Image (cartoon, grey):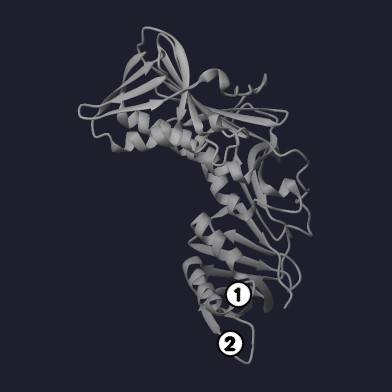
Amino acid sequence: MRATLPVKKLQEIMDLMNKFVSRHATLPILENVYIKWGIDTIIFRATDMEKYIEIEMPVQLDDEGSITINAKTFVDILKTIDDDQINLVIEESNQHVIIQSSSDEFTIKWIPASEYVAIPEVQSDTPIKIDTSDFIEGINKVEYAVTEKNFSPVLTGVFMRIAQNEGEKELVFVGTDSFRLAEYKISYQGDGEELSMIVPKVHINDLKKVAEYALMNEAQEMTTKYANNMVEFTYQVDAMRIMCSSILIQGSFPDYQQESIIPTTYESKSLIDASQLEKAIKKIEILTRDMNNYILVSGEQDKVNLSSWQTDLWHADTSLSALHEGTEYSYGVNGKYITDCIKAVSWEEVVMRVIDSEKPIIFKDKDDENFTYVVRPLVK
């Protein structure tokens, strides 16, 4: 097989492939990318056996075949090419792949495609259309609240569902590690009625990178299919089809819509500049970073005070202006939980709702009621 391929497009494809290749494979074949070509298309695949990607692009060829080559080696070679196009020559007689530019030629060995694993097909009669930008934003709003390791497996992924709210459908994203919880709701106008799945944290960012690439190339919509323990996302990028899939976490996500987890009432409310709050927390964390990032937050009249533990060696206090309503309050919290959220959601002003020192604290975007962030207080 001999094909002339655009270098920039091939680099983009391989950058995506490389995110799905196994990093510590017990099977050497999983460090490879699968390449299959026909008369008018070429297909690239990669997997680590838990997440999969397949990209199909049109190209004019004169035969059919398939091979696998080491993904990292291929990526590293492509990074050195300055030309706009390369010639990809696959010699079946001696199992060589030759990559040629105007001034370079690389020859590497390929492994037969017969040794590569098959990509599981997600069987679903009701695919769901989702705006690509909504998917990206939903993940950004909640994934930082999830940890990859947790005593409960269902808490190691991002929960996605379609829900009914007063007759209107919403696409809901939730992430929690049991100490904090982030929920983001987006109005959903699609035809899908059922969606409820938990996508592993370890895979969600790679899936998001594919979505970001698709959106950058004006793929405004993604087709979602899920069944049993798999989810599949498909994008049409010009004449190129991109499909990525992942295993799902099995189990029921906790019923988090309870007053004890997300309180709907509160005794006090403070409106604070988000950047000033982040800066104040970082000041206190200079002394508390080795002590669970503990900070004491108190609100009164027109300000919010932050302080550290009181010890014989050190103590820190700082304050910032705030619009305050209700009674005075005081609670302990892991400061990093607050700064994680501020960085992820790009708040300008944050509304902090407090019941007492033992109940969850609610953080809201002043201009976006669809986002809710809950943090459990710490006991000093």
| Mark 2, secondary structure of its residue | loop
Q: Is residue 30 above or below residue 67?
A: below
Q: Single out the mark in the foreground, 1 or 2.
A: 1
Asked whether the beta carbons under mark 1 and mark 2 sit within 8 Å of each other, the answer is no
x then y, percent, for residue 26: 60, 36
Q: Nearer the viewer, residue 194 or 74?
A: 74
Q: Nearer the viewer, residue 64 or 189?
A: 64
Q: Is residue 197 above or below residue 336?
A: above
Q: Residues within 10 Å of mark 2 (few under 14, many from 20)?
A: few
Instruction: From the image, tell me which residue sits under label 2.
Output: 315
What is the spatial separation of the Cα atoms under label 1 and label 2, in whole angstroms? 14 Å
Mark yes or no: residue 170 visible.
yes
Q: Which mark is residue 290?
A: 1
- Taking 53 as reference, is 160 left or right? right
x then y, percent, for residue 357: 73, 74
| Mark 1, secondary structure of its residue | loop
x then y, percent, for residue 46: 52, 29
